[in-house]
Amino acid sequence: MLRQELAEAWSSLGKRPLFVLSIVLTLTVTLGILLCVVNLNQVLLLKALPYPAQERLVVGVGNVYESSEVKFADNVAYPIAELLEKSKAQTGLEQLAILNYGEEIVTNIAARPKLRITNVTPDYFPMLGAGFAKGSGFSARNGLGSHEPVAVISYETWQTYFGGRDNILDDKVVVNDVSYRIIGVTAARFVEPELFQAGLKTNVWLPWEFNTWPPEIRRNWSAFTDQIKLLGLLTANQRQAVAEQSINSLVSDRFKAETRGSAFLNNASYRVSLEGLKPYLVEDGRVSALLFLASGLALAIIAFINVFNLLLSRAAEQLRELSIRATLGAKKSHIFRQIFAEHLLLVGTSTVLALLLATVVTAAMKDRVAGQLPRIAELSISPATVGVAVALVLLLALAFSGLVTHLLNYRRLASQLKSSGKGSGLQVSATVRDTLVVSQIALAAFLLVAISSVVRLSYETIKRDPGFNIDNLVFANLSTGALQPGRDERIRNIEDLTARLKQLPKVKQVSSALFVPMMSNRWTSSVKLDAAGTETVSVATNLVDDAYISVMGEKLVSGSNFSRDDVNSSAPKVLVNQEMARRIAPDGDVVGRHVYWQADGEGEFKPNEIIGVVRDVNIPRTPATPRLYATRYSGLRFIVQLDQGATLSRQEFLDVLGAVNSQYNLYEYERVDDIYHQLVLKDLFIVWVAIGLGLLTVLLASVGIYGVLNYGILLRRYELGVRMSIGAAPARIAQMVYTENLILCVYGTVASLVILIAADRLLARYAGYELPLSWGAGATGYIVIVASVAAACYLTLRSIITRWPVFALRSE
């Protein structure tokens, strides 16, 4: 039906390439962004999980409470997990799996890679409906108490490390000197739930009993970790609350009995709450997805207003042609179809290109944003996204055509041929023009203020001084496998390896330490502030030597560092940070005092003298934490300080290690600045995305505001020329126009504040998130908008106030 109109529209638009390019570029970029965020929200918030019984899958979230306050959130103690697995028939769940996440070196692969290992119980694969490219999952005989060394590997691991060979079930993986027979390869389409960390992909699944937790942790009811997870499947038609009650009836009383008298926990309680798998997985990404969607919609509306302005200018050009058609008998529907054909071509072409752009951006997001948002591995241009694109084509083409046809006023088209001179063109009312300007100011200001606030928070996190060195440092963690060397042998190896590393020309210093600062929260121990034990503090603990403070660039604010003799004799001395010092004494003067430290989580609290206070360190997104540094550490972990700009490759380290003990493996080898930057990767992503959105917002809003204001000034050229002819100075004309548009800025500012408040309240209510608004960020956003409006006013006025009035009078 539209074939003829489309052919005419194609021919007509071909004569206006710049007009077509302006609209297609604007819509392609903004619709591409909108489709990306719609697709992201569809995957995170709407798309069903790829599991057969996804609506019945739940995660057990364990919380430790003291005085009705959460002390540890989403943590599980090893014996709690095993208790539930042994008693799963009493939990009310149809199936239950316990999981333990870790990393290990696989020594029978040439490169000896460190792979992701997950220990699971047999119900794990069946409850997820996992398919297998080869073999099968674990059977019931691989449950608790079973020590049959079998393994399941992922499809990606099969292809990457085993070349996808067909006889993979005849192969093995060797971890910690245990040879595991491969019994299955998961299907390529299998997507494991990211329970431990977004973007984490398991390489090898092993039976539960082969986890590496030591015996003292396996029996300790107060040794909590987030590495152990509980995954369950509700029975059909079972209420979540009923299963939750059954689980807590098994755990709560037993926990209190096992932790009674614990110095680490003071009258604590433990409760498991069941959360749906999908809400649990997407919780961390829900706010980000909604913010991206709100930004994409606001940006799209600004772009639509700009396109509408361009289409109005196009309609003004076509006014004489359309008037001739109306005079010759064309009906209103014919006029609408002609305009609709052009708009359909423009919007349709833009949307096709937007889909291509969205496909490219989506592929890039899967690579670059992995680990920052949940379910990114499932991201792709879905049929739902294509459906949204088709709907946008029709809605935008119809909306643009309807608005333009309405403004053309069919009844006046025939009379246009008889009109000439003043007022003969297509004119948009001042109310419509003002509404367009105010709406663009409101949306742009809302976006800029929100973006400035988010950028400020993330930028401060990125640029904040950590309080320690991160450059020219390498952290190495060795694995002894099944060798089990004694303490004395370990210490000899530490000293030998340290001496050999120091002989390298590029090495300045070497420290033997359990953690670098941003890792030290991995171990929390208990400290009594006095012998009576009236107050116990949980502290982030690190075991260090005498070189640690200088190597890491941490600063002693009082007291002294460990001496070499302190390290060699494992002296009962400690360093504390300022936060810990303030816990002990409000003035922080604690050097010479004693604290009572429980090193192993179960033994007695032994007195240790505080010999120094270390300046607090700033770990991104981590609150101020009491820290304790003790000595000596007999583990095989090293921090190597290099000369400025120097590098020490993994192979170079392995060469030195081989001279000390060739049976040791290099379990972990990372630059300290890489470890630190991983903590701010999400903030860097937020900053770059926000800056891109901000620049695009300013560009689109400025162009749109300029277009409307320029149109308004053109309509008033004659009026302004008359004012100048009778004596109005250019400054007076500029003041009048600036004042009129300042009022529009005020209206737009008020409207943006309303939008901001509404968005903030909606996010707080439905997503539990409040925008990090600040006066500085707000001022920045509004200053940019005012500057954009002022620049648009100047550019539109320049052609009038810089020339003689006669030019304005001639050219209305």
Image (tube, rainbow, N blue to C red):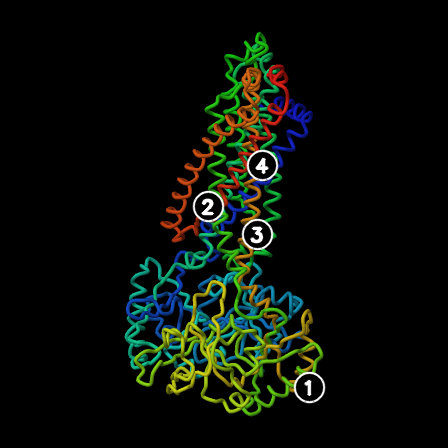
What amino acid type should be assigned to the residue bearing mark 4?
A: Leu
Give neighbour class at mark 4: few <14, some 14-19, many 20+ (Cα, 10 Å). many
Q: Secondary structure at mark 4?
A: helix
> Which residue occupies the foreground of this view, 761 or 344?
761
Residue 535 percent coordinates (x, y): 32, 78
Vertically, is 343 above or below 202? above
Q: Secondary structure at mark 1?
A: helix
Residue 688, which numbered label?
Answer: 3
Give neighbour class at mark 1: few <14, some 14-19, many 20+ (Cα, 10 Å). few
Asked if residue 190 shows in the view, the reply is no
What amino acid type should be assigned to the residue bearing mark 1?
A: Ala
Disc 1 to disc 4, C-alpha distance: 63 Å
Disc nearer the start of the sequence (1/3): 1
Res 68 quadrant in image: bottom left
Vertically, is 288 above or below 648? above
Residue 659, which numbered label?
Answer: 1
